[in-house]
Image (spheres, grey):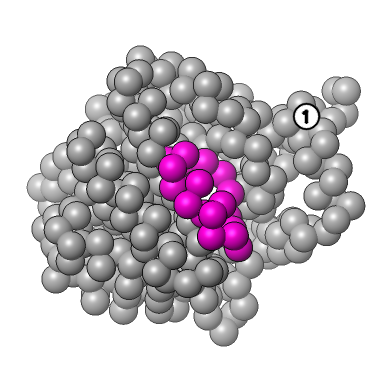
Amino acid sequence: MSSNGQGPITEPADGRWSSINGIFRKGILLATSNRLVSSGVKRFGMRLGAGNFVAGEDLDACIQVLKALTDRGFHTNTTLLGEHVTDEQMASDVASEYIRILDRIDQDECRTNIALKLTHLGLDLGEEVAYRNVERIVTHAETLGNFIRIDMEESDRVDPTIRIFKRLRAEGLENVGTVFQSYLYRTDDDIKNLLDLAPNLNLRIVKGAYLEPASVAYPEKVDVDRKMIEQIETLLDNDCYVGIATHDDRIIDHFKEYTEQHGIGRDRFEFQMLYGIRTQYQQELLDEGYKVRIATPFGPEWYPYLMRRLAERPANLLFLAKNVVRR
């Protein structure tokens, strides 16, 4: 099975791949805060290949990508990239920009919903600031028949994110979902504590992309994969709608079989993948009749997003390096 035109990357049977991948991941995430690396990537990254993972630096460029994917039969979500806003007016402006994005999506008839980060909407200034801004967005999306996904960020922001999500639901807003990260030890309990909101619960499950200590997150890939499968099964078995967010063939194949064996309709889940990664595989899943949603972010603040994508999979780093060599 191909990945962006390359052959599959296989894991050595002795597990060495997991250790190598872990070293790559930690190194890249640590480099994210390095000023020299940051300056170089921000200056040249978009020209050297970052544009293959980010749908442009402005909304007009992103809309063109969203329309093209819609025309091909994909669903999408989009994100105005940014996080950790510490100015209240700026956070309010971000909320206003998301409302403009929702209107543009509606106008151009893109099959697209929104994913956003609460720190981009002022969470670091306080829960009330973030709640006020995200409530504006979710309420406006409801009038358009659209859906908002609240992304999960670092482990110390899980509790306020869940509280804000539950508060929105308590206000009668059902067009909102959130995300759980399988590598956090706490995720099993967090999911169980939300199951009373089923069957109208819409959650995305991801492995996790932040650099977290072993005291709060599983350090080994095999454990993260196992927990991801268990958590998705729990949600499906409790009548939840699940965004299965992975490019891992083995996990995807597992849920093709699991949903067939348990009579779970394809309207109960979707496979979610990232723009620019394993594009041929995305098309294959779509051709098989599965709902495939492609995360298609945009904006000038693309650097942290790109670095997390490089950390998730060494093949992405090799792709970027090849573009550097060609130039």
Q: Residue at (27%, 41%) from the top-left corner?
A: 141
Q: Is residue 45 magenta?
A: no
Q: Is residue 196 at all visible to an observer of this figure?
A: yes
- Amino acid at the residue labelled 1: Leu
From the viewer's perspective, tell me whether residue 78 is left or right of residue 102: right
Q: Residue at x 42, y 71 (%)?
A: 127
The x, y position of residue 194, in whole percent, is: 23, 71
Mark 1 — residue? 48
The answer to whether 58 is drawn above or below residue 248 in the figure is: above
Q: Which residue range is magenta in the image?
A: 79-98
Residue 94 part of the magenta segment: yes
Q: Nearer the viewer, residue 218 or 111?
A: 111
The answer to whether 4 is drawn above or below residue 223 in the figure is above
Q: Nearer the viewer, residue 294 or 40?
A: 40
- Left or right of 211 on screen, residue 240: left
Image height check: is 180 above or below 173? Answer: below
Quadrant location of residue 108? top left
Residue 267, percent across and down?
Answer: 17, 39
How many residues crowd mark 1 within 10 Å: few (<14), some (14–19), many (20+)?
A: some
- Which residue is painted at 89% across and 52% down in the image? 36
Could you tell me which secondary element the residue under label 1 belongs to? helix
